Image (cartoon, rainbow, N blue to C red):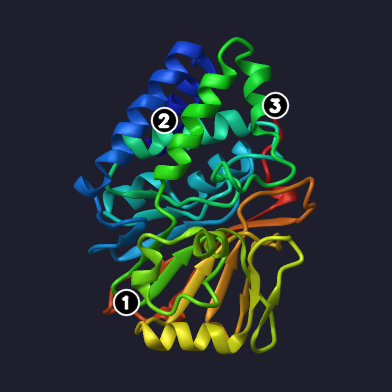
Amino acid sequence: MSIDILNILLKNVRLADEKLYEGYLEDYMNYLENLNGYFNVDGGLINIGEHKYGYVFGDIHGDILTLVTLLQMINFRQVIEKDDILIFLGDYIDRGRYQVETILFLILLQLQYKRNIILLRGNHEPPEWLLPYPHDFPVYLRSRFPDKWRDLYRDFLGIFDRMPHAAVSKNGVFFVHGGISIKASTLDDYKSPDREILTEILWSDPYDEDGYRPSYRGAGYLFGKDITSKFLSKNGLKLIVRGHEPCNGYVWRHNKKVLTIFSRLGEPYYNNVAAVAKIPLSPTLELSDVEFVTLSSDELPKV
């Protein structure tokens, strides 16, 4: 049955003309403007409620085939029926052939299951003042909707600015696309961040030393093990889960206090494994029991 609903959503995505696509975006903006009716939201920070497990996806970048395959592999229907939650860490667009379709698919998925899916903002869901490079999403929008792409892109920029950028669970897991701020020390700083802190949330990466240094990306910082430990300790947290960095599915950093997840395959990253992490969210469960569902390039269905 889960495959049926996924196929229905995929069909809606394929058949969406300019007017219908625009209508879906309007529905989604209304949803985001009333997000606190479905989640406990404070600014751009979601406080995750009573869910046993979270199934966490990293970067997707227009790889809709891998995305749908992973949803099938985790038995998506059962996840929803058990009132577990799906958390996506951002970067739905850019660099992939089906990015226009991927982000609409995820929007429709969240509109279908409003209380069980979280879409966080990534650095490729950018503020207008911090566009990534390459940012080919407008090119793909223009290719599919040559007469309406400017209006649709403007709609998307408004949606990106409304998307939450972080989430925290009751058992001490902090979810974010890029990383933590080298200056912001409490969760309150993540609710309504200024430009500098938002840049770090979307762009920063961990590195295996102490302290920090400017990022090779040209935005954000590389933050060290000591910064991770201080942030977790000060806020009563145990783990940071983030995306942003290409890897073969997942990688642990900072003595297993930072987990990076990557959920797409192929060019331009040429990683061979994509992953979803099953993370305990209940205080009655042990965080050491994190599990992974992985998909290799050889296992990806041929279409």
The number of numbered discs placed on residues in the rendered structure image is 3
Residue bearing mark 2: 4
* Position of residue 260 measured from the top left corner of the image (x, y, whole percent): 59, 67
- Is mark 3 in CB contact (under 8 Å) with mark 2? no
* Position of residue 44 measured from the top left corner of the image (x, y, whole percent): 36, 56
Give amino acid for label 1: Asn
In the visual, does 63 lie left or right of 108? right
For label 3, count other residues whose C-alpha is less than 10 Å away and answer few (under 14), some (14-19) or many (20+).
some
SS at mark 1 in the image: loop
Residue 228 vertical position relative to residue 49 in the rendered view, above or below: below
In the visual, does 112 lie left or right of 141? left
SS at mark 2 in the image: helix
Residue bearing mark 1: 171
Badge number at residue 139 = 3
Q: Residue at x 69, y 48 (%)?
A: 299
Q: Residue at x 56, y 58 (%)?
A: 202
First-in-chain label (3 vs 2): 2
| Number of the front mark, 1 or 2 | 1
Task: Please tell me in which quadrant of the rendered image residue 275 appears.
Answer: bottom right
The quarter of the rendered structure image containing the N terminus is top left
First-in-chain label (1 vs 3): 3
Q: Estimate the spatial distance between the alpha carbons at disc 3 and disc 2, rounded to whole Å.
A: 31 Å
For label 2, count other residues whose C-alpha is less than 10 Å away and answer few (under 14), some (14-19) or many (20+).
few
For label 1, count other residues whose C-alpha is less than 10 Å away and answer few (under 14), some (14-19) or many (20+).
some
Q: Nearer the viewer, residue 256 or 194?
A: 194
Residue 251 vertical position relative to residue 144 in the rendered view, above or below: below
Q: Nearer the viewer, residue 240 or 179?
A: 179
SS at mark 3 in the image: helix
